[in-house]
Every structure is written in C-alpha cells, then in structure tokens.
Amino acid sequence: MDVWISIILSVCAASTPLLLAATGELVVERSGVLNLGVEGMMIMGAVAGFATAQVTGNPYIGALVAIGAGALFSLLFAFLTLTLVANQVATGLALTILGIGLSGMIGEGFVGQPGIRMEGLNIPFLSDLPIVGQLFFGQDLIFYVSIALVFGVSWFLFKTRAGLTLRSVGDNHTSAHALGINVIKVRYLAVLFGGACAGLAGAHLSLVYVPQWVEGMTAGRGWIALALVVFASWRPGRVLIGAYLFGAVTIGQFHAQAIGIAIPAQFLTSLPYIATIVVLVLIARNRRMTMLNTPASLGQSFVPDR
Amino acid sequence: MKKTLFALAASAAVMLSAGAAQADGHAKTKACFIYIGPTGDFGWTYQHDEGRKAVEAKFGDKVETAYLENVPESAEAQRPIEAFARSGCNIIFTTSFNYMDPTNKAAAKYPDVKFEHATGYKREHPNVSTYSSKFYQGRYVQGQIAAKMSKTGVAGYIASFPIPEVVRGINSFILGAQSVNPDFKLKVVWVSTWFDPPKEADAAKALIDQGVDILTQHTDSTAAMQVAAERGIKAFGQASDMIKFGPKTQLTAIIDDWAPYYIERVKAVMDGTWKQQDVWHGMDHGSVAMAPYTNMPDDVAAMAKKTEESIRDGSFEPFTGPVMKQDGTVWLKDGEKADIGTMLGMNFYVKGVDDKLPQ
C-alpha cells in the first residue's frame, strides 16, 4: 500500500507544474491571446523562486516572488502584443528564448547550491491519518493551490459575469468592444494571470520537485502545458484530467521499466507524448466540439479604434 | 503558419550568430567547445567547461576559447560546429556521443581545423581525433561499494541512452557488485535524456519504490542525489562531486577530469604537433577520479580504495573473465581480458542485470 501512495505522490508532483501552467494559459487563450512563452515564464519563475528562497531562507517567499516574476515577464509580452500589436506567435517564441537565456544569466551564481525544499504540510492528526493523510493533508502547498486553481478558474469562467466578459473577448473582440468592454484591459489581466501561474509552476519545479537551480531545468514542460490546453479543448476540468494523465503515464512507465516489463524503454518514454497526440487527433475529428470551445479570436490582434 | 516559420528562422539566426562571432585574424589559438547541456548542469557539461577554463588559465593571452551550450544531438549540431569552424576556431571539441557524424562531416569541409570528438569512434578524416575516459573503471568500484552497503541486494541505475558507453558502465557496476555478492541485482530505468532534472527525479522515485536502496546514474543532473537524500537511501554522484546535494547520501562519485587532455591538445595545436589519435585514458592518467569515500564504514572504504589503486596501477581490469553474458553464455573465459573492439561497441548485458537492453 505504501508503494501505491508513494506512486500517487510522484504522479501529483509530476502533474502539478503542468496543471498550473496549463490552467494559466487556458485563461490567456480564452481571452483570445496565444502566448507561446509559457516555457520562458515558467523558467523565470523557477529561477526567481529559487534565488529568493536561497537569499531569504523561506521557500514561501520564494514562491510569491516566482508568481510576481512570471507575471512581470508576461507583462513584457502583453505590452508588445497588446499595446504595440506585435505578432503573438513570434513574440511568444521570443519570450521563451529570452526567458531561458535570462534565467541562466540570473541564476549563474546559484548553480550547484542545494536548495531549500518547500516541505509538505504537517497538520496535527490529519496528516498522520493512514492512506489519506499523506495525500490530502501532507503534500506541499503548491499542490493544493493547483487543484483549487482549476476549480476556481472553472467557476470564474462559467459562473461569473467577469468570466463571461473574458470569454466574449476571446470569442469576438469586435463585438465585445462594441458592447463597451475594454478588450485590451481584459487581455492584459488574462496574460498577467497566465504569467503568474507559469511562475508558480516554475517555483514548484525549483522548490518542491527538485530543490535546485540548473539552467534549462523546465526541459520543455512549458510546451507540454501548451499542448494540454488544446488537449483539454479549453475546458479547465479536462486540463486537470490531461495533466494527471500525462503525469501518470510519465511515472507509470518508469515503474514498468523498474519492474522489468518487456516493452522497449524508448517506447515507454515516448508514451506520454504519444498519448497527447492520440487525444489531439481524436479531438480534431470532432469538429463540433472543437468549434464550440476554441476561442474564435485566438491569436488575433485587436486595435480598439479600428 | 508563415509567421511561425519566420519566427523559427529568426530564432535560429539568433542562435547562429552567437557562434559566428569574431571572425578576425587569430594570432591567438582559438579552442572551441560544443556542449550538450548547460555549463551549470553540475555534471557532464560542467566538467568539460572546467577543462575549458583550465586551458584558459594555463595559456592566458595565447589562447581564446568559445563555447556553445545546449546544442542538440542531431544533424542540427552540424550548423553550430561549422559556424565555429568558419569563425576561426583552430580546434573544436565536440563533447557528446551523437555529435559523431556532424563532427566528421564538418571535418571534411574544414580540413585546416582540428576536431576532437568525445566518446565516439569515427575518425573519417585526418583532422578528427576521438577521446574518452574509462569511466567504467569507477563504476566497478561503485558496484563493490553498493553490494557491501545495500540491505535489499538491489541497486537502481538511471540510464540515458543505450549506447556502448552507458552499457559498459552498467556491466562494470554489476560485475563489481557480484565480486562481493554473487546474487546482487540491478534494476535499470532508461530516461531517454541526458539532462532533465524532474524526469531524473521521477526515475529515482520509481526505482526506490520498487525496492532499490542504492542509486547510481548515467545522467547529468544532481536530481537523483536529492531524491535519494530525501528518501534516506545512498547514492553515487556522476561526473562531478555531488556531495553538497547529499552530504549524508553520497558514497562516492566518478569525477571526469578533462583538463589535462584539453591542455595537451591545445598545446599540440600551438606547437603544430597535433596528430590524429584515439585515446582512452582511465584512472592511470588521472582522467577518471573518485570523490572521497563517504557515508560508509571504514572497511568498505578500505576495500574501495584498494580496488581503485589496483585499477590505477594496472594490476586489475574490471572486464576480466570469467564473465557470463545475460543469456548465460560465456563471454570471457577465466582470466581472459575483453578486447578493445568489444569494449567500445558493447551492446549486451552481463549476467545479473534485471532489464532487457533496448536495441
């Protein structure tokens, strides 16, 4: 039984950064903006969180700073694409390249330092319960935040007026503008939120997952988060499922290898990616569902006075 | 879509220009390095970069160095290598196995530039040398320690890609372990990457959950060491001394010391004495060193030191018979030593490895 709990905890750890970054990006894309800079914002969060935790000795302050760093970095993207109306795809890619380079520079002095781990919660009695204790009351705070965030975002998008406004901006920015909605402001806020989430995802990597800083430590997780948003056809609940499916396959294949199941290791390591592609193909076949959920203005620039 | 392509092209151009800097005349000797990971990985690439710094420190003004990090191990590697060749590099070190073909192709185009490819075996042109270190010698010592220290009798091995270099390490480790405990088992997990700290951590957790109590790795980050520390088991560092990441965890580490070789080869270029060669140095040349033996009883440390010493002075070689292959057939008869061809192309497991080698 302990092994299973340990496996589930590993899956949670593997899925949390993906879930956070993907949830943030989902809100951004729902507002009609395609920010391909998730990887860059995530790694900025990772380095900022780690550096702050090292200096202050407190991983929670580190996580807060990581959120700020991700948001600040996304502000650059927002300014370029929303105010200066630069191409979103190109700007997003540039943001990723910049983030990877800049984080390497900022973090240079922190390489090779063992980090401070954000320990799991320790609630008297509850955390010590058999089986459920570790899962529900003993994990790190960022894990619980990530779960709460999915439900929060789902509620926000589909149950609140502000959420409706955000979706309307993403679906048809011209109409939204005609209705008197400040399209640019809504998109700024959405992009900032996405940056904050990506920053926290980065903090999870450098403060919980592997408490250390090394250049390029996100290793493509930002791109997986981007794929997850499409995978989930822009629905928060499905992002949750997708992230955990991906995490479970990732962890599961290592166990399959360790047990010695005679499946080629190369195939097993590519399984999470194959699963993503298969689901993407299945979604693309269902045109109605795709049409229903894809923000119609996704990736299109908007100039208010046109 | 067009815009996406444009963006990709633009980003590629940015990356290239980083390598194509300074094409001015060179009274100085220019030594250039292609790295698979970031210099801050605190493992493989870090050690190569230490070698580069040693070259700078040794020759001062007479030398200029340049490097490119995170160069992918594919045909794509050819562009940065050639950009280096054009930018006036006199000698280019390509420091990962799969740079083998790109290095040889670039060598054909730039016959005046010297190329040094790490861990490979192709020397198709007179201006290509290959070099490597006998890391497996250190693995044997680790295997012995693991067998002494393990309570479950099972160690875990985080492996990157099934190339001879890695397979050799796995085999050497299990041979060392079996010399102490003939029933010792080794579980191997392939992560299909040299550098991905979270993934390496995942693999480490999976192995621990499957009952191993000693971890060793052939990947480049310190993540596995941290997981081992967190779970309270023992582990070996890889490529550099990782003791800081597991003060109570690291038993020892294999340290790659490239500095003597890089200094020697850059000097050869300066003196005009550079010739093609294929070197494979081990503990005897100091290119494979062991970190201090820590977190183990004195008798285990003494045993490890003795083995290390006998490998260094040449009185012992890990791949000495009797050795059985995984399928039970005899590979090396009693007292027989492995020939270098089989060693360099090793594509089979020896007995005791609890894994099927990916082909």
Image (spheres, helix red, strand yellow):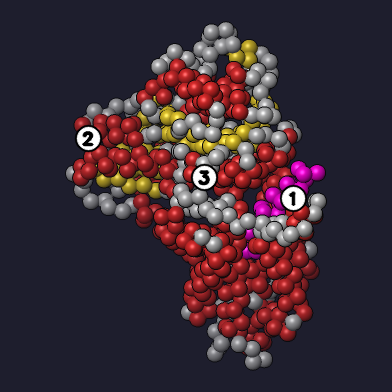
Which residue is label 2 attached to? Answer: B270
Q: Which residue is pictured at 37% across the width and 41% down the height?
A: B50
**Mark 3 nearby-residue class (10 Å; few <14, some 14–19, many ≥20):** many
Which residue is label 3 attached to? Answer: B245
Which residue is label 1 attached to? Answer: A8
Q: Hey, which residue is sitting farthest front in the picture?
A: A124
Q: Could you tell me if the residues under marks 2 and 1 are in contact, i.e. CB atoms within 8 Å? A: no
**What is the x, y in percent for residue B269?**
25, 34
**Mark 2 nearby-residue class (10 Å; few <14, some 14–19, many ≥20):** some
Closer mark to the observer between disc 2 and disc 1: 1
In the picture, the quarter occupied by the N terminus of chain B is bottom right
Mark 2 belongs to chain = B
Secondary structure mostly seen in magenta is: helix
Q: Which residue is pictured at 56% across the width and 52% down the height?
A: A211
Q: Which residue is pictured at 67% across the width and 39% down the height?
A: B208
Res. B109 in view: no
Mark 3 belongs to chain = B
**What is the x, y in percent for residue B22?**
27, 52
Q: The magenta stretch spans which residues?
A: A1-22
Q: In this view, does A195 lie above or below B66?
A: below
Q: In this view, does A36 lie above or below B351?
A: below
Amino acid beneath label 3: Phe
Instruction: Examine the structure image and report whether residue A300 is included in the region drawn in magenta.
Output: no
